[in-house]
Amino acid sequence: MSKPLTSLRTAVAGVSGYAGGELVRLLLDHPHLADTPPLLLGRSGAENISLTSLQPQLSGLPHADSISVVPFDWKLLKEEDIDLLFLATPHEQSREDVPHALANGLRVVDLSGAWRLQCEKNRAVYKFHDADPAAAAKLQAESVYGSPELHGPQIAAARLVANPGCYATSIILALAPLFHAGLVDLDHGVICDAKSGVSGAGKVPTANTHFMSAADNLSAYAVFGHRHTGEMLEQLNLTGDQLQFTPHLLPIPRGILSTIYVRLNTPASISTIQSCFDDFYADSPLVRVRRSPSLPQIQHVVRTSFCDLGFQLSPDGKRMVLISCLDNLLKGAASQAVQNMNLMAGWPETEGLL
Amino acid sequence: MSKPLTSLRTAVAGVSGYAGGELVRLLLDHPHLADTPPLLLGRSGAENISLTSLQPQLSGLPHADSISVVPFDWKLLKEEDIDLLFLATPHEQSREDVPHALANGLRVVDLSGAWRLQCEKNRAVYKFHDADPAAAAKLQAESVYGSPELHGPQIAAARLVANPGCYATSIILALAPLFHAGLVDLDHGVICDAKSGVSGAGKVPTANTHFMSAADNLSAYAVFGHRHTGEMLEQLNLTGDQLQFTPHLLPIPRGILSTIYVRLNTPASISTIQSCFDDFYADSPLVRVRRSPSLPQIQHVVRTSFCDLGFQLSPDGKRMVLISCLDNLLKGAASQAVQNMNLMAGWPETEGLL
Amino acid sequence: MSKPLTSLRTAVAGVSGYAGGELVRLLLDHPHLADTPPLLLGRSGAENISLTSLQPQLSGLPHADSISVVPFDWKLLKEEDIDLLFLATPHEQSREDVPHALANGLRVVDLSGAWRLQCEKNRAVYKFHDADPAAAAKLQAESVYGSPELHGPQIAAARLVANPGCYATSIILALAPLFHAGLVDLDHGVICDAKSGVSGAGKVPTANTHFMSAADNLSAYAVFGHRHTGEMLEQLNLTGDQLQFTPHLLPIPRGILSTIYVRLNTPASISTIQSCFDDFYADSPLVRVRRSPSLPQIQHVVRTSFCDLGFQLSPDGKRMVLISCLDNLLKGAASQAVQNMNLMAGWPETEGLL
Amino acid sequence: MSKPLTSLRTAVAGVSGYAGGELVRLLLDHPHLADTPPLLLGRSGAENISLTSLQPQLSGLPHADSISVVPFDWKLLKEEDIDLLFLATPHEQSREDVPHALANGLRVVDLSGAWRLQCEKNRAVYKFHDADPAAAAKLQAESVYGSPELHGPQIAAARLVANPGCYATSIILALAPLFHAGLVDLDHGVICDAKSGVSGAGKVPTANTHFMSAADNLSAYAVFGHRHTGEMLEQLNLTGDQLQFTPHLLPIPRGILSTIYVRLNTPASISTIQSCFDDFYADSPLVRVRRSPSLPQIQHVVRTSFCDLGFQLSPDGKRMVLISCLDNLLKGAASQAVQNMNLMAGWPETEGLL
């Protein structure tokens, strides 16, 4: 990691969605970027629109009322001396854009699922059609999974950071300390029962996101086939048989709570497990580890950049219930992207996030 | 009114929406219709679908799991000896269908806004294009506004009942006793501030009905131009300047609360006003008048067929705040339609509704 | 089972809570009880209150506006020729009342946890102090766990029916067919991740039930120590190590969804599992089994008496995710109590419940 | 106004409630107070508790995890060189504390209703029992109503600022420009129909704030007698007969929307009214005036320090509907208190609030 940058020029493609809106809010508010609001890029009808007509809640923030989305254009990115491009675009678009971006000398933080998965089998669910498969494979190998708590040094040096999925972040951060310490009984496997607010389903109105469908309801979906599963398997080095992930749609705007069931190799004490987590995250200011038996709740993390972790042990010390909470639009998307930017620029990890 | 029918064959066109679903539920459950489930009619892709795939919550009700929507067909209505046709269709469709229905000897309860308004100026907002304007005008004049508390005898004898709008029902029932008694100071006019749950906005997913837009929010809409205003003016015999109606979108699935502000001609006592309401609704089992200062709440009426009314007076007896609550899908739509059917068949008004 | 009763006199103790309110609603509406509204009993300040001041939403139902809660009195129960007493009281009170009730010749359906558990170890969590432990033990042994789908004939003949817990009902009904068929791999155990609406937490205002705590939130609680766990263990014949149950508080008024994780002894096909469920519940009209991969949602069961079950299998047929939904106040409490009454009276199981 | 302070020592009494929590959050985050976290004061059992056990959502903010509430003590305030005391205490307590605070040389921003009302008749609703009525009357006359948009210079110089009520702020800011321009027809009076989220009802669990009472509901309360009415009358110079205020409890955590009905003295054009508002708030960065017919919504202001205003005119230009939105805990309480502090310290009004 070279010395910190004094300034950085950023661009954001994909400003109309929920994660894009949160990302722009964080960048407008970022202490190192006060004089240089991000260049906002749009395509196919989403350009030449004022920021606040797309994201009315940003009105009043510095620069917010005077900037508009400009047509996506690689030349413009060069003319404007952009250093770092955030892609808050659909994964097909990100898959197409990243090779061009790197070729144009940009560094990229991609918030989509396009570059997160190294294993072709896991990636199959996205059905990518790369124009140049060999080049794509090379970039894929170069991309760094943007989990700052796990891959900080690699992120700092990366050209291409694949910002993790929201569910994946909540589950990987909860399990990483246990797997790192070799405590998990893999014969029994791990059960991850996750619940997410409706913003996770995107901004396009559908039957499922209609207020009447989502309110006063709860439903499971994508039971044996959610796209984020591959990220968990790869980051935790597991086979598909060893991790069961079930997402549910919660009747709240934002926030994820994952309840994770683990059997331990050998009975453990609360203090052993507590130390395992405390030590693992000692230098991770955006992960808050609760004292067992205290457990996180969604309200404690919504509109924050934190991932909160807590656990309880069965009386015999053999079974464990882990609770992991984060805001799916922040630590699960936009604030994790900014955290990655901070690392890439050599700034403190939490700059602009507390 | 002739003697009560012993049986009745009903059909429902438009089964996919919220009001249509509630209507079918009430008809399946109706004590006089136990052996004759309604014929369900659909058009343009909504036919040949099982009822429970359109309305899964009806599964398990008598007949519900074995009936399907059949293609709309006037001949079929005749073959099946249908007596009464409910239209839960868009108003353009109802405007087109009603002349054919009456020509085929059917009686009709139309849940849309197609036939509610006698005044052409009020009707203009709907922009109807009648194939035969003279015939339409004649049917319009014949149609009865389906407010059982106000027009019971006419409804009992009607061929065409125009089932009232949800907002209109809540406001007309609250004001009718006062206007009937001549107590309202019309120089000051009447202010109606109404709030409705999201089901009132229909089942089609839109940006406004997206959970993220509606939840944790409140917004006013159609401030000087809501379609239901005309019904209030006509039923209460007011000019547009004398009644101000403002609807709001509440972050709840169903229910309407209208807060109504009235100045009285002369100062009144609580007991005078209480008697005015009690007397007016003495024979109306589906209007519940609260003892002042007790006021209705939305929770008390949701999933019931009641309209609840309550009021408070200013200490000087000159000003009045009226609260009116009902379930927009029931007393504001489906159960009022069934109440009208009961009158048309000569059955007790509340049959199948308590 | 003797021949059906033509009539039955019922009493309800504990009318002020949510389950008690739903129970009274069902009894007032019950076709066999139309002429005999339940006698409502209260103690310590909850007596001599009109029903509708405790449960305003019942106003307008038959008898509802004219009945009041009378002081609890064994003599009165006799004078009124009560046959069946429903206890919707706290478990300590039920534990105390049941011996007197049986001694007075009453049959009892107890909605509390007082008499559900045969195993003393499981019962310890309730900390009962029986006046006459030997007599209590005898009654305990006589009591029938009121799950009509599992113990119909015993319920029909019982003097004392212990109405099951809401969570327990949802989980036991989901797992019973698999255990009955011997399909579950018990070495891996069963994980039950359950989520309940706030009515499950009772009517007394607390910090946890404050709107600000519950809304826009999700939290796990009682992780290794929920009282309903014992019921699941006893009914499914499991040890505490074999079943992990974690309840969560959902930001909705009512409804439970349980997500249940099972490993199978040998890989199974979807049709095998589907038949297992279909056959088991062929004669259970209040359990609706969905066709895999269709899954229940809370909205489909709220304000109904159904328990909906659905499942999906992993591609290799070894792992299974079960979803079970019910309304915690109905199939999880009041409607199951009425279902038990129907069996005890020899009436059809669903009488008054569809 | 003297020259800006370079630093300021603050104290907050009453940290456990919603407004107190938001206030502490804003002070911890305030750029001029980065090195000097507020002294937190508690009484009667609320002392010696860590901040984050009272307000868990603040964990991770600067200083938040290391500060605790200390016992309220005037000597301590002196020893710690406190300049400005925020009172987020009940109004009786504030009424008692303020004389001591001023006597001890402190400046005060009081968030309660204790010192807002100059007119004894309006104040009667609070039933104060002043130990020294004459002294209290003198302080009352000295107190400045803390609406920065209306009384900025007086606030800057004040010893005692009475921070306005949440409803009052939303309505006074909406009406002030019209009254200032003399446009309102007072013969017809003004109707204010306001709706507030549940946080406005306070943190103490009650039957009304129980999730089951508040969720999926709407109710009016305090119809002719809400405490904030007096503030509106005094600030707008109206008699009780000229302004009708009706609050409602919304099923959302936070936010107020007020719908205000006004008749104009003479018909006006949209541009006249728009200019009236634009001009009045030209130097008020925390009031956002929308272009008619665009209207504010609660979502646009929640968790911001803004008050959003919008309006529509009837076609004849005689009647007007105003919509005013703010976050009841921020512009309606805590951020307005910080805005007042900024003025008192000579800092920019929005410091720490955007």
Image (spheres, coloured by chain):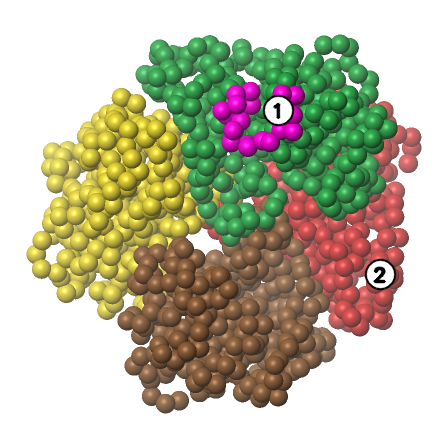
Chain colours: A yellow, B red, C green, D brown
- Give the amino acid at mark 1: Pro
Do badges 2 and 1 share one subunit?
A: no
Q: Is C118 in the magenta?
A: yes
| Relative horizontal placement of residue C56, taking residue B280 as reference (left or right) | left
The quarter of the image holding the N terminus of chain B is top right
Chain under disc 1: C
Q: Could you tell me which residue is drawn at 32 percent across and 28 percent down?
A: A318
Mark pair 2, 1: CA separation: 61 Å
Across and down, in percent, residue A326 comes to 35, 46
Looking at the rendered image, the disc whose residue lies closer to the viewer, 2 or 1, is 1
Chain letter for mark 2: B
Residues packed near mark 2 inside 10 Å, few (<14), some (14 to 19) or many (20 plus): many
The residue to which callout 2 is attached is B273
Count of number-bearing discs? 2
Residue A291 belongs to magenta span: no
Label number found at residue C133 = 1
Q: Position of residue B46 (x, y in %)?
A: 56, 29
Q: Please state if D17 lies on the left or on the right of A180 as rendered.
A: right
Is C133 drawn above or below residue B209 in the view shown?
A: above
Q: In the rendered structure, are the residues bearing label 2 and label 1 in contact, judged by CB atoms less than 8 Å apart? A: no
Q: Position of residue D165 (x, y in %)?
A: 55, 71
At 57% from the left and 60% from the top, the residue drawn is: D201
Q: Identity of the amino acid at label 2?
A: Ile
Quarter of the image where one finds residue B239: bottom right
Q: Which residues are magenta?
A: C117-135
